[in-house]
Image (cartoon, rainbow, N blue to C red):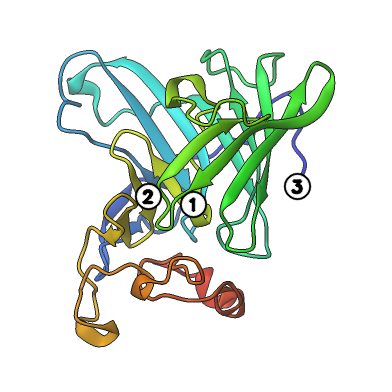
Amino acid sequence: MMRSKEGWGQVRPRMSEGVDEHGAAVPRTGRPWGWHARPAPGLERRKGYNRRDYYYTRSWQIIQECCGDEIDPEDMDDIVTARKAEYVWGTRYIDAPVLRWHDDDDDGTPGNDDEEELYYCNDANMNVTAVVGESGGTWQVLERYLYDAYGRPRICNADWSDTAVTWANSKKNEILFCGYRYDPETGLYHVRHRPDHPTLGRWMVRDFEGYVRGMSLYEYVTSEPVGLLDPYGLSDMTVEEVKAARGIVKSCG
């Protein structure tokens, strides 16, 4: 997938019109564009809040991130158009990120010299282990990531001299454990049908099928996070099983 420096691909806003039986957003019909999700924290309605909108594919892969500053609560339904980041995903696995373009100066005008390109590296369980970018005229690892068993991230600099980089001083990469999207405000992973709490090592929503996988309705991948993952928030799988179900993934939700 190629993109010119002259401009990022436009993703037409697409609002949802409800949820399905699993709680996933159902988009309006007749508009074949990215799905739209908007974080709505409790303090959002105060005057002058900052908003971040995310746009997804039908497989719930984030493809664009837009920002708006000093939003008036009366204008909550307006679409924010300042593009902050765009993502490219691989075809070998549903949560295999390839590239993030990032507008570093927050001016919403990608394609200038302030745009950053980050390429993703991951391990066999699809955890993002590092991002590679250009620095000083050469391409090199810019940031590394460590996780505990259930995905609580630790950000490290490239040479491991600092293994406790704060989010504010990091590349603010939100694609981390198992390729899930990390929400730095809540510390949760967004995993399509259910949010995952890495510190507690459990889901935040009950299993939709009941007790079919054990006596805990909130257990994450039957307590085997090293060998299993769950990209849908519905059932634990191995990476190979997820790849085999790729056709189902395309119609997820």
Residue type marked 1: Phe
Choose top left, top right, bottom left or bottom right for residue 30: bottom left
Residue designated by label 1? 177
Residue designated by label 3? 1
Residue type marked 2: Tyr
* SS assignment at label 2: strand
Give the Cα separation between the discs numbered 1 and 2: 8 Å
Earlier sequence position, callout 3 versus callout 2 = 3
* SS assignment at label 1: helix
Q: Name the front one of labels 1 and 3.
A: 1
* SS assignment at label 3: loop
Earlier sequence position, callout 1 versus callout 3 = 3
Q: Is residue 36 left or right of residue 18?
A: right
Q: Residue at x 44, y 51 (%)?
A: 148
| Label 2 Cα crowd, 10 Å radius (few <14 / some 14-19 / many 20+) | many
Q: Name the front one of labels 1 and 2.
A: 1
Question: Looking at the rendering, in which quadrant would you find the C terminus?
Answer: bottom left
Work out whether residue 32 can be spotted. no
| Label 3 Cα crowd, 10 Å radius (few <14 / some 14-19 / many 20+) | few
